[in-house]
Image (spheres, rainbow, N blue to C red):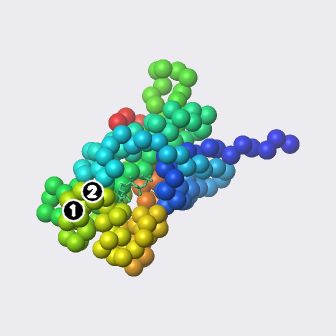
Amino acid sequence: MMTEQATQVVVASHNPVKISAAREGFSGMFPSRAFSFTGLNVPSGVAEQPMTDAETLQGARNRARNARQAKPEADYWVGIEGGVDDSGDAMETFAWVVVLGKHSESAAEPEQMGRARTAAFFQPEEVARLVRSGMELGPADDQVFGSENSKQHSGSIGLLTGDLINRSAYYVPAVIGALIPFRNPTLTFSQF
Ligand SMILES: O=P(O)(O)OP(=O)(O)OP(=O)(O)OC[C@H]1O[C@@H](n2cnc3c(O)ncnc32)[C@H](O)[C@@H]1O
């Protein structure tokens, strides 16, 4: 009997919160399929701390594309980029998720892709001030909360909610959202 090969998903990061969010999102959307997940460090092509919505989306897209270039034999490539936007009256925090599917052989076939953004929340001024002065959000959180490497555990959202929602759980709905075009292949979603 032939054993079915697991569908290979490359997550463009070694951050365990991103890999576990991808795992939950894919298995939730496609419960009957077997997946294997690999983390891969690739350039995001944007600043270490993206400061606008557009830069954050660009980082997620670049990560997914660079992962596809580095591991073309996989089936899906996932770029997750956390960012902030300080253009309003306070510093908003969110992340973008971009999922790319296998390139079709035919040039006429559009690229398979999906994107979604997390919900947003606002940083307290104590953290925002440090980020405005050039610190990344992860280290700024650690300084304010006295934590260590929180970006790979609770994340900002976990520190601010007493872990009611941690960074991984916070990313799961956006991974699910980015998989909508793959779950609805007969519908048309715009390219980006
Ligand atoms: O190894 P990579 O994949 O780069 O993981 P990262 O945690 O550095 O993540 P990002 O590049 O996506 O995020 C840019 C910076 O913003 C921080 N950040 C973004 N969203 C965050 C969140 O929800 N909680 C904690 N830190 C966050 C992050 O830790 C970085 O310092």
| Residue 4 x/y as whole percent | 74, 44
In the figure, 60 relative to 126: above or below? above
Outermost top residue = 107
Residue 190 visible, this angle: no
- Is 6 on the left or on the right of 105, as rendered? right
Asked if 99 appears above or below 174 in the picture, the reply is above
Q: Marks 1 and 2: in contact by CB < 8 Å? A: yes
Task: Determine whether the residue tagged by mark 1 lies in a helix, strand or loop.
Answer: loop
Q: Is the residue marked 2 within 8 Å of ligand 1, measured from its CB? A: yes
Question: Residue 149 is drawn in which quadrant?
Answer: bottom left
Does residue 127 appear in the picture of this structure?
yes
Measure how far apart labels 2 and 1 are at the Cα level.
Answer: 6 Å
Q: Quadrant of ligand 1?
A: bottom left
Q: Is mark 1 within 8 Å of ligand 1?
A: no
Q: Secondary structure at mark 2?
A: strand
Q: Amino acid at mark 1?
A: Met
Q: Quadrant of the N terminus?
A: top right
Give residue 73's position: percent from left, percent from top: 61, 34
Q: Which residue is mark 2?
A: 84
To which residue does mark 1 refer? 91
Q: Residue at x 55, y 23 (%)?
A: 105
Residue drawn at x 59%, y 48% is 38
